[in-house]
Image (cartoon, rainbow, N blue to C red):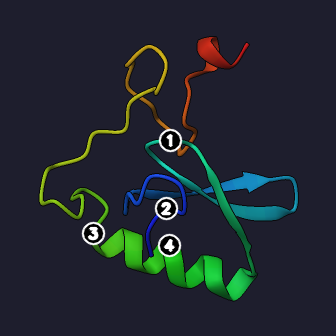
Amino acid sequence: MKCKKCQSENLKLIDSGPHKKLVCGDCLAFQKFLSKSEATTFNQIKSDNKSIHSDGEIFDPVCRVCGDPLTTEELACFYCRR
């Protein structure tokens, strides 16, 4: 699956209350809400390739704003989200 806006294959699953939403990891564009079974499948696929992008590069999760390392699947660190 590719991003509807920028055609990137770097998609992220984010908890939004009781919902799971799929967003682009590059441009942060919302893609769609996922059902529980879709989210489980997405996580299984991502866990198999968790450290490698589709272009083969190793991925280190970093804040999209300041570049600091992240410990969760958020797209921005705690300080940048304030």
Q: Residues within 10 Å of mark 3 (few under 14, many from 20)?
A: some
Marks 4/3 in contact by CB < 8 Å: the verdict is no
Three-letter code for the amino acid on which mark 1 is drawn: Cys
- Looking at the rendering, which quadrant does residue 76 occupy? top right
Query: Mark 1 Cα within 10 Å, few/some/many (few <14, many 20+)?
Result: some
Q: Position of residue 21 (x, y in %)?
A: 70, 61
| Horizontal and vertical percent position of residue 48 | 30, 75
Q: CA distance from mark 1 to mark 2?
A: 9 Å
Describe residue 69's horizontal placement relative to residue 52 as left or right.
right
* Residue that carries the numbered disc 1 in the rendered image: 27
**Would you say the residues marked 1 and 2 are in contact, meaning their CB atoms lie under 8 Å apart?**
yes
Q: Is residue 75 above or below residue 33?
A: above
Q: Is residue 36 above or below residue 46?
A: below
Q: Which mark is residue 74?
A: none
Mark 4 highlights which residue?
Answer: 43
Q: Check disc 1 and report its element: helix, strand or loop.
A: loop
Q: How far apart in space, not on screen, are marks 2 and 3 (Cα)? A: 18 Å
Q: Secondary structure at mark 2?
A: loop
Q: Position of residue 6 (x, y in %)?
A: 44, 52
Which residue occupies the extreme front position in the image? Answer: 5
Whichever of callouts 4 and 3 sits on the residue coming sooner in the sequence is: 4
Q: Residue tagged by mark 3? A: 49
